[in-house]
Image (cartoon, grey):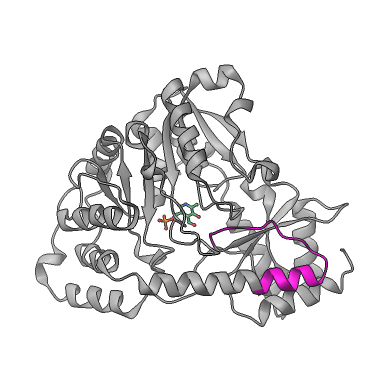
């Protein structure tokens, strides 16, 4: 019998696993559950990407060990993509790292560039998997509170000066999971100045980078002058191309951080299945029409859901991107008791905000990953509980 190592024991409990368990238990009772709790994109991978992959799987060379550090043609395509979409110039050799999904990069980066006991800053609320990196690297965690009044952007001036002095690395995530907030160029300029003054590395998680609403394309952190001196952006094919199961993403920006990620990858991994890397090139080189169509669908759903929620007196935070709605909890409830009530009495599953950290208390996250008329039905069921 083997016991889990001390580090493994410190890894945070996967909060979505307990949510799925609750939802499954409710489904098992025969209830018609409307699941707004999960974050798994519902739309198919575009056909032209699947076709590219299928063609590539027929090529024997693609079944051998692939090149360490990824296909140079994919790195070139990623650099071209940044140039075209954001006007950002990147050296494909030294400023791009291919990842088996962005999560792996986000989790291994603290291990790659920090030492045990170093201080790292994470947003609160925030994507829970960042905590795995904290535990694996045995670093000290400090939280940056995100407040609705600040549009869920951290206020650097309010961070304890000692924490600022100690911090070596910070994570940002815009468009944001769970709130749907988007960042401005101004905020990124402040971030670069704060990072330079205090010698803090920046990782901006751009998982929802393509998904911006109201005609506003989310800005890339790397568009900020000096961004490459202080940090990187993490990109994924999971959301913009619905390739979540394929496990492919990339990191772009600061060459030292990219080299550190590559070194870890050399030791733990070879690279992503070459046929998938080739299909990823096809995705990046495409005219992005599939992405525009997807964003239009998410925007339509957001508007439909907001309309249905407002009709029952449930006022959402006005999100600007991602595919989540961040909804306040009525008086007298916690995030968890409210989510439990909705599942129990209305058969509507939502993610309790405290699953994203203490800063998420008072909210629930609604995933806009099903079609109408289910949103309206969810809101009608909730209306019957007379909470608003
Ligand atoms: N970052 C955020 C904020 C996410 O919400 C997710 C997935 O849900 C990821 C990263 C992970 O994406 P990937 O599939 O590239 O590992």
- In this view of the protein, which residue sits in the foreground, 351 or 161? 161
- Visible in this render: residue 3? no
Instruction: Point out residue 144 in the picture as x, y percentages from the top left corner.
Output: 60, 34
> Which quadrant of the figure contains the N terminus?
top left
Give the residue at x 19% y 73%.
57
234 to the left or right of 83: right
Depicted 161 relative to depicted 188: above or below: above
* Residue 91 on the magenta segment: no
Front in this rendered view, residue 20 or 338: 338
- Please give the range of residues in magenta: 304-322
Is 85 situated left or right of 52 in this image?
right
Q: Position of residue 176 (x, y in %)?
A: 54, 51
Image location (x, y in percent) of residue 214: 55, 64
Question: In which quadrant is the C terminus drawn?
Answer: bottom right
Residue 385 rendering spot, x and y as whole percentages: 87, 70
Residue 36 visible? The answer is yes
Residue at horizontal 38%, vertical 67%? Answer: 243
């Amino acid at each position: 019998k083997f016991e889990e190592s001390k580090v493994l024991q410190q890894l945070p409990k996967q909060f979505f696993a307990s949510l799925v368990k609750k939802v499954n238990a409710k489904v098992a009772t025969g209830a018609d559950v409307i699941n707004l709790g999960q974050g798994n994109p519902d739309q198919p991978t575009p056909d032209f990407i699947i076709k590219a992959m299928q063609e590539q799987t027929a090529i024997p060379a693609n079944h051998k060990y692939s090149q360490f550090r990824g296909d140079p043609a994919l790195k070139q395509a990623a650099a071209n993509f940044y140039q075209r979409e954001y006007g950002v110039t990147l050296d494909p050799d030294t400023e791009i790292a291919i990842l088996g999904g962005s999560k792996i990069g986000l989790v291994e980066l603290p291990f790659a560039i920090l030492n045990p006991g170093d201080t790292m800053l994470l947003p609160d609320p925030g994507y829970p998997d960042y905590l795995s990196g904290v535990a694996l690297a045995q670093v000290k965690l400090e939280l940056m509170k995100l407040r609705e009044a600040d549009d869920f952007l951290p206020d650097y001036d309010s961070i304890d000066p000692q924490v600022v002095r100690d911090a070596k690395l910070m994570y940002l995530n815009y468009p944001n999971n769970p709130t749907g907030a988007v960042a401005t160029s101004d905020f990124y300029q402040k971030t670069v100045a704060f990072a330079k003054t205090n010698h803090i590395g920046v990782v901006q998680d751009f998982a929802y980078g393509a998904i911006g609403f109201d005609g506003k394309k989310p800005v890339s952190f790397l568009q900020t002058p000096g961004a490459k001196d202080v940090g990187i952006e993490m990109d994924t094919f999971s959301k913009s191309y619905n390739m979540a199961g394929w496990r492919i993403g990339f990191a772009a920006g600061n060459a030292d951080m990219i080299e550190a990620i590559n070194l870890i990858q050399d030791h733990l991994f070879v690279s992503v299945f070459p046929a998938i890397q080739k299909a990823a090139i096809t995705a990046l080189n495409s005219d992005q029409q599939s992405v525009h169509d997807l964003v239009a669908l998410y925007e339509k759903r957001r508007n439909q859901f907001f309309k249905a929620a407002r009709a029952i007196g449930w006022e959402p935070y006005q999100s600007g991107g991602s595919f989540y709605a961040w909804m306040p909890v009525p008086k007298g409830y916690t995030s968890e008791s409210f989510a439990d009530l909705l599942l129990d009495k209305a058969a509507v599953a939502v993610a309790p905000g405290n699953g994203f950290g203490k800063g998420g208390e008072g909210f629930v996250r609604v995933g806009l990953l099903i079609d109408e008329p289910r949103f309206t039905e969810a809101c009608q069921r909730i209306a019957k509980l007379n909470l608003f």
